[in-house]
Amino acid sequence: MDDVKDTIYFITGNNYKFNEIERMFQKEKISYILRQNTIDTTEIQATSIKEVALFKLNSVKGKINNSYFIEDAGFFINIPLNGFPGVYSKFVLNAIGNKGILKLIDNFKNTKAHFETVIALYFQPMNKTFLFEGIVEGKVSETIRGTNGFGFDPIFISNEIPTNTFAELTTEEKNSVSHRGKAWKKLIEFLKENQ
Ligand code: IMP
């Protein structure tokens, strides 16, 4: 590759997500410039995060003349809600908020939850799509705690850092264990191998 850096677009309207990924990107010696792109994508209601991510990626096909990626995540409360809200995370958060979610849980001594994410990349040099997945396991906090991050961060406690909710962590701390952090590391490895 010549010394003119290629741009890679992260298509998202969510500035928190862009900020998380930008922080991780800056630490890497990599020959791409990361930029945010807020072009509209189409989000479908499907049964898996992977399906949603692929549809979202394909909805901007032909509109961007570079490599680009999107990311789609969900919050799954396995115990006691059998995975709810999962693929309905956005809708549920908007409808009832973290306060409403906590009201659905009767026993906080035994909860199990995880975040799942899929980064879908269109890689222009190969004219191909690649998926990178990340999961973080943990539990639900009994109360809403912390002001950092976004979404369900104030009610999620990871197994790796059991003293704090995600909203009580710095961006760096969250990235070190989070679903997006893990998927991101896989994307970075891929870009390093293919630059
Ligand atoms: P999205 O469709 O990928 O933006 O995410 C679905 C829902 O999960 C949205 O309501 C987000 O706020 C929430 N969400 C996604 N990632 C995170 C995270 O890292 N922490 C907390 N909530 C998240």
Image: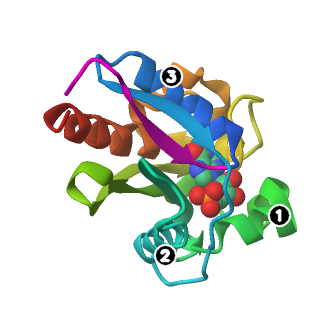
Q: Earlier in the sequence, mark 1 or mark 2?
A: 2
Q: Residue 162, which numbered label?
A: none
Percent across and percent down for residue 189 are 21, 35
Q: Nearer the viewer, residue 146 or 53?
A: 53
Describe the element under mark 3 as helix, strand or loop. Answer: helix
Q: Nearer the viewer, residue 123 or 166?
A: 123
Q: Residues within 10 Å of mark 1 (few under 14, many from 20)?
A: few
Residue located 37% across and 40% down the image: 184
Q: Residue 94, which numbered label?
A: 1
Residue located 59% across and 20% down the image: 170
Q: Residues within 10 Å of mark 2 (few under 14, many from 20)?
A: some
Q: Is residue 190 visible in this depiction of the protein?
A: yes
Q: Is residue 141 visible in this depiction of the protein?
A: no
**Residue topped by disc 3:** 23
Q: Nearer the viewer, mark 1 or mark 2?
A: 2
**Residue topped by disc 2:** 55
Give left or right: position of 88 versus 54.
right
Q: Which residues are magenta?
A: 1-12
Question: As shown in the figure, which amino acid type bears the numbered disc 1?
Answer: Asn
Q: Quadrant of residue 86?
A: bottom right
Mark 1 CB near ligand 1 (8 Å cut) = yes
Residue located 68% across and 62% down the image: 40
Q: CA distance from mark 3 to mark 1?
A: 27 Å
Q: CA distance from mark 2 to mark 3?
A: 27 Å
Describe the element under mark 2 as helix, strand or loop. Answer: helix
Q: CA distance from mark 1 to mark 2?
A: 22 Å
